[in-house]
Image (cartoon, rainbow, N blue to C red):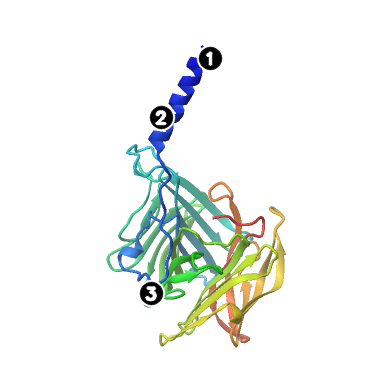
Amino acid sequence: MLNKIRLVIIFLALATSAAFGAPPKMLGVVPGKALSFPLDFGAHPEYRTEWWYATGWLEGPDKKPLGFQITFFRSATDHDAANPSGFAPRQLIIGHVALSDPAYGKLQHDQKTAREGFGLAQAKQGNTDVRIDNWRLVRDASGTYQATIAAADFSLHLSLTPSQPLLLQGDAGFSRKGPLAAQASYYYSEPQLKVAGSITRQGKPLAVTGTAWLDHEWSTSVLDADATGWDWVGANLDDGSALMAFQIRSKSGDQLWAHATLREPGGRVTQFDSSQIRFQPERKWYSPRTKATYPVATRIQTGAITWQLVPLQDDQELDTRQSTGSVYWEGAVRLTRDGKPAGRGYLEMTGYVKPLKL
């Protein structure tokens, strides 16, 4: 009897192995690969991780500022890509949405997760079209993004229209994230998007306008083994310029890697490497929920330029452990340049509760 049980167990193990097969082989990010549009607006399932990430500042008729974040993640699993079953979880789609309103006092946010398929979730190739249930971000033929999000406490219906060319980050879209060339992503931004639409809370719609920033990034291996998280800012400046800056922090808290891009109104682009960039905390905020401390007011040095970031409100922490397993601070910030008002953007800080793992 025991021998028969052992045979059954072995048979089931072999059958399961045959059904699932070997994990799919993911492509690596390499320098020199030219990004191609509109194809690269769409999903890249042959890479491990991908995200479309829109942040911006809005205001209604009362001119009171609001911040918003809409993020869709696509994550490839280790399930056999050749498995024909519709239940095979080849890709996971994750959504985060948040609204910053100083009158509310803390971040309002929501999250969703689903496997791709069955008409419930998708990340299409060829153009931006990602959705989970009734959350959707789609790029139309004119290049405008339509975002429709029905969160637990609010809903967003926004149109994000480009006003400038794409901004390819790093070396023509090849963005290093660490000391090794393999620690990189393909990365482009769409700054200075013009936003119009509505926010509905407690059944009351509010017409809004504003500006936004959209990032699209995909990769297979991003962070160094010594990395614990990052600080990133994307900012639409009042003169039409666009600033992106980030640092990867090591487990000791030191800067492991950094990069920044500044595009001026005339189109001139300046790239800053790690030796030219410093993130310096100026004021910290303690989260009573997660016990994390975030440098919510920060000074950033890019070459000879000094930027200072001040948050719209201190509490802009997102607890997304039910979807991505992480907690991070993602918030609207005002910027000054060498002491003078310069613009508005979003600051993201990860790895302050525990080291971030992608």
Nearer to me, 194 or 305: 305
The amino acid type found where label 3 is placed reads: Leu
Q: Residue at x 58, y 55 (%)?
A: 357
**Mark identifier at residue 15:** 2
Give how far apart the Cα atoms at labels 2 and 3 are.
48 Å
Q: Is residue 105 above or below residue 118?
A: below
- Expressed as whole percent of the image width and height from the top left, the position of residue 192 reads 43, 75
Q: Callout 2: helix, strand or loop?
A: helix
- Expressed as whole percent of the image width and height from the top left, the position of residue 180 reads 53, 67
Nearer to me, 58 or 188: 188
- Decide which of tag 2 and tag 3 comes sooner along the chain: 2
- Expressed as whole percent of the image width and height from the top left, the position of residue 142 reads 29, 68
Give how far apart the Cα atoms at labels 3 and 1 are.
65 Å
Number of numbered discs: 3
Q: Which residue is mark 1?
A: 2
Q: Which residue is mark 3?
A: 166
